[in-house]
Amino acid sequence: QRSEDMSTPVVVHGTSIGDPYASSTSGTPSDFTKGERQPTQCRDPIFAVLFYINIAAIVGVAAALGPGAFDNTSGSNSSNTGGIDYAGYVASVVISGCIAVGLSFLMLLVMMRIPTLLIKVSLIFVVALSGVWAVLAILSGQIFAAIIGVVFFALGVCYARCVWHRIPFASANLLTACSAVRSNCGVTIQAIFSAVLAFGWSLVWIVALLGVYETSCSTDANGNQTCGGTSYGVMFVLFIAYFFTHQVIQNTLHVIVAGVVGTWWYEPESSGCCSGNIFSSSIRALTTSFGSICFGSLIVAVIQALRQLANQARAEGDAGALACVAECILACIQGIVEYFNKWAYIYVGLYGYSYLEAGRNVITLFKNRGWEAVIADDLVGNTLFLVSIVVGGLSGAAALVVELAGNFIDGP
């Protein structure tokens, strides 16, 4: 809804009908059937078990093989991979990671203050990227790439013109989301904790990867070390383990926020920094709905792992154009599945559906509500994309400054 001067979006809560977890709700008299609270029981538990096995396996590999990769015996190459001190890399990553967490929190505050401006800037930014691509391609003499850039720029301009009048609606959505976060600021703490947890998992996985890589190295009679690399099969398993955990962390937070916002929408007076809504939503996400979260996360993780292997094969010249085509197809599939999961997990967080049941509800939603929700979500997504670029760019720049100032990384 808009205020009377038609310039500032305002937040309007739904009719107070009680917490959706307090009692079942019946469908509304329309062509769309509202979700209903599901009986309390564990959904898709086998995938939660697979997740725990995944964690245990990587931690075990990191503990068993990781320490050998960090041995840095002076004057000898027999105890480390090519004489590289990996501790310097870890120190640099830790510092840049801490900076990224701080910047993420800062950008969240900015997004809460100026949602409409950010949506407009992000839409222009996304369109301008295609224009920059076309210009750079022309300057470098890449005619085919320039044509593609011009086409995407033209399509982007048309899209921006068509959806510009929908920006107020998207702004209201973003403002509503930010208002929900402000009213339940405990989810911000959970978001920061999730970022730290994901960062910690990356460190553990890197240690495991270095340990596995170290097993492919051998030392000859003269003390020279050679490494044969890691097979695609082993890397596929490691990539699945890495992406699986990151997807679970991300999607668990998504389900928690969906539950909290759903309750806030109908009962805004029950909100608070450490309210019972946040606690109960977290418990549901980590217990009865955790298997459903792992189910969808594993699907995306497999696609991401295949895409990473295709990218690696293309970089090493093992499959030529075939790897490039495979990577492009997998990227499209990943985008579709991730977008589908984003909506499905809202049903999981709000009503406790299993993953497949939530998916069927998402299909029904789009059949009955058309593209309006998709467009609004895309405009908000552009804003998040711009914020991610800002945080990533500043974090990378900070890491470079730290490296130049501290000289953490030493070569062989």
Image (cartoon, rainbow, N blue to C red):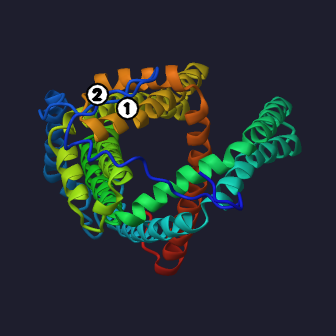
Q: Residue at x 54, y 22 (%)?
A: 329
Residue 370 can be seen in this image: yes
The secondary element bearing badge 2 is classed as helix
Mark 2 burial class by Cα count in 10 Å: few <14, some 14-19, many 20+: many
| Residue highlighted by disc 2 | 355
Cβ atoms under marks 1 and 2 closer than 8 Å: yes
- Tell me: 105 left or right of 264: right
Q: Residue at x 36, y 20 (%)?
A: 360
The amino acid on which the numbered mark 1 sits, given as a three-letter code, is Ala
Coordinates of residue 374 in the picture (x, y in percent): 57, 34
Q: Which mark is residue 344?
A: 1
Placement of 208 over or under 359, stated as above or below = below
Mark 1 to mark 2: distance in Å? 7 Å
Coordinates of residue 287 in the picture (x, y in percent): 14, 42
- Residue in the foreground of this view, choosing between 251 and 25: 25
Coordinates of residue 408 in the picture (x, y in percent): 42, 73
Placement of 390 over or under 309, stated as above or below = below
- Tell me: 134 left or right of 196: right
